[in-house]
């Protein structure tokens, strides 16, 4: 096997071992005084954003800890993010900001996971897009609106 073929095979195996997700959802969350959470589409009542997704079985991926990045793009096209929160997108080659991340324990089974984003400034009205990445590969997205 020549070097070029081996490199291509390694890229294919790496891409195949990336987590696959299904049923991606994102919604505004209001935190009540008693600590209970309720979903809201009202931007004035939104305290944080919850992003949930199902990790699908993947026989190629090794079990263990997996880091999932979420990128939430607000109505103005700006990524909601802290300074310095970025990665090099494998597919586009561009430096991309991310909003938040979580580490999940992958055991090969389908499991639901959620992550949250809170910010110090109020959320704006409009359409938000949420993208998910694993090993800096895009793995899913969804949109939601705050009114």
Image: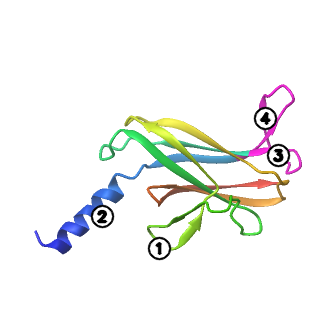
**C-alpha gap between disc 4 and disc 2:** 42 Å
* Mark 3 lies on residue: 46
Element assignment for label 1: loop
Element assignment for label 2: helix
First reached walking from the N terminus: tag 1 or tag 2: 2
* Mark 4 lies on residue: 38
Which of the two marks, 4 or 1, is nearer to us in this view?
1
Name the foreground residue: 109 vs 49.
49
Q: Quadrant of the C terminus?
A: bottom right
First reached walking from the N terminus: tag 4 or tag 1: 4
For residue 135, which quarter of the picture? bottom left
**C-alpha gap between disc 3 and disc 1:** 34 Å
User: Circles 4 and 1: CB distance less than 8 Å?
Assistant: no
Image location (x, y in percent) of residue 138: 49, 60
Rendered residue at 84%/59% (across/down): 125
Badge 1: how crowded within 10 Å, few (<14), some, or many (20+)? few
Element assignment for label 4: strand
Label annotation for residue 93: 1
């Amino acid at each position: 096997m020549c070097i070029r073929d081996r490199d291509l095979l390694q890229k294919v195996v790496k891409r195949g071992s990336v987590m696959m997700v299904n049923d991606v959802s994102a919604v505004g969350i209001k935190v009540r005084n008693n600590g209970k959470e309720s979903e809201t589409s009202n931007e004035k009542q939104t305290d944080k954003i919850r992003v949930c997704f199902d990790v699908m079985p993947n026989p190629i991926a090794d079990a263990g800890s997996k880091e999932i990045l979420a990128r939430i793009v607000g109505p103005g096209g700006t990524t909601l993010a802290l300074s310095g929160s970025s990665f090099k997108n494998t597919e586009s080659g561009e430096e991309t900001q991310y909003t938040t991340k979580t580490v999940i324990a992958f055991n090969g089974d389908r499991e639901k996971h959620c992550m949250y984003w809170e910010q110090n400034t109020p959320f704006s009205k409009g359409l938000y897009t949420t993208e998910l990445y694993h090993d800096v590969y895009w793995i899913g997205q969804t949109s939601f609106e705050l009114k």
